[in-house]
Image (spheres, grey):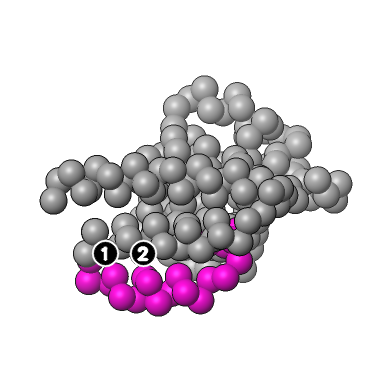
Amino acid sequence: MNSQERKIKIFYLKKQVLFPHCNITVRLRSSKHSKDLKVGQEIIVYPIRKFTDLFQLKKRVSTLAEISSVEIKGKIVVLQLKGLKRVKVTKLYGIHLAEYITLAEELSNYDKALTVELRKKAQELIFLINVQESDRLIELMNFIIDVSQISDFLSNYFVLDDETKIELLNKTDISDRSKLLQSKIEQVIEKLGKQV
């Protein structure tokens, strides 16, 4: 863990998870806390599924995000966010301001074959889903060579269950995250195979 701490705004995302190296669109209620957000500003986002997740904030992983765009639509603020890195909140000031530390990702028992297998399983899943963008997705995945980035990319775009997404976000060991992700993708492939 990096001991460098910083005070920053924090937002709680209901049933949305942002991974590093990925983008999402977020809708927030316009408030004094959200209406002064600017493009380029960094914020922390913490995913919640239920109220009790708030009590786990300091034990779980959040994402440091950069705001790519801000659009105010009446009482709603629409943000386009880019995930930067995994962080852990160390101190809260009220509910809208936090200090955090950056979490170092670990790579225990790294196996290059795991990255290759993960990419193959994802391509198999893309073929089974058969969407218009399938070819572009496969091409894009071939450009991602870092195992951390590919596991985050696949977690963000191919895992639909919020609980599993949060579990994957909280895994800072890249090997563990990749193995869990591979297992989840295999389960989806098996389900889709039975439907065909």
Looking at the rendered structure, the kind of residue marked 1 is: Phe
Looking at the rendered structure, the kind of residue marked 2 is: Gln
Query: Mark 1: which secondary structure?
Result: helix
Residue 180's spot in the image, x, y percent? Answer: 50, 42
Say left or right for 188 vs 108. left
Q: Quadrant of the N terminus?
A: top right
Query: Residue 172 falls in which quadrant of the image?
Result: top right
The magenta stretch is 131-150
Say left or right for 102 vs 185. right
At 54% from the left and 50% from the top, the residue drawn is 178
Mark 2 Cα within 10 Å, few/some/many (few <14, many 20+)? some
Residue at numbered disc 2: 123
Compared to residue 9, the image places residue 66 above or below, namely: below
- Do the residues under discs 1 and 2 have CB atoms within 8 angstroms? yes
Query: Residue 55 falls in which quadrant of the image?
Result: top right
Query: Mark 2: which secondary structure?
Result: helix
Q: Nearer the viewer, residue 60 or 50?
A: 60
Q: Nearer the viewer, residue 54 or 172?
A: 172
Compared to residue 66, the image places residue 177 above or below, namely: above
Tell how many labels.
2
